Amino acid sequence: MKITEFLQNHQHKIVSCRRADTLQAAASLLYSNHIGAMPVVDSSGKLVGVLSERDIVSALSQRPSELMKLRVRDVMSAPPVTAQCEADMDDAMKLMISHKFRHLPIIDEQGRLRGMLSIRDCLAMQLHDKELEANVLRDSFIAARFS
């Protein structure tokens, strides 16, 4: 399945932050929206990075005395690794696995942010596909048995 099809069927609200936001404000956004990562955008809405829970935990462990002064720009992952809307879900999952992260910004042909894809989304899609495949095989077996 193409990522664009998945995004159309699963309307996700894109929650984002800015480079100048405090880590506390960004962490509150992550927590209140029940998400593990979010895109970081500039004033024009252009994707400039990704902030994840892992980035915040890393900052907490490595720079605890500075934590209240840190901004998103100090800990975000940049430049962001992205996938195109027309890519396959399987390719997006492979990209996340190879880079060892769980969230992937999705952009269109013009580079505009269109959504965030999680490894959970990819796994749910794989499970759905496997269930469909199992149903088809079961139905084929039943049909062959009674013909």
Image: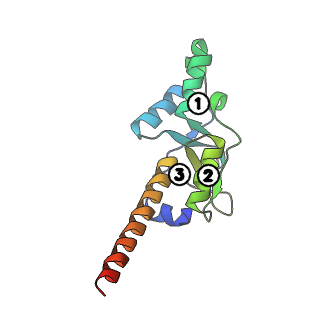
Nearer to the camera, 55 or 29:
55
Disc 3 marks which amino acid? Leu
Q: Nearer the viewer, mark 3 or mark 2?
A: 2
Helix, strand or loop at disc 2? helix
Q: How is the image coloured?
A: rainbow
Q: Which residue is mark 3?
A: 117
Measure the C-alpha gap from mark 3 to mark 2: 12 Å
Q: Is residue 8 visible?
A: yes
- The quadrant in which the C terminus is found is bottom left
Helix, strand or loop at disc 3? strand
Q: Which residue is mark 1?
A: 55
In the picture provided, is 132 more to the left or to the right than 70?
left
State which quadrant residue 66 falls in.
top right
CB under 8 Å between discs 1 and 2: no
Q: Which mark is residue 94?
A: 2
Q: Nearer the viewer, mark 1 or mark 2?
A: 2
Disc 2 marks which amino acid? Lys
Q: Residue furthest top?
A: 65
- Pointer 1 or 2: first along the chain: 1
x then y, percent, for residue 93? 57, 52
Helix, strand or loop at disc 1? helix
Measure the C-alpha gap from mark 1 to mark 3: 18 Å
x then y, percent, for residue 57? 54, 25
Measure the C-alpha gap from mark 1 to mark 2: 21 Å
Residue at x 71%, y 42% (from the top left corner): 79
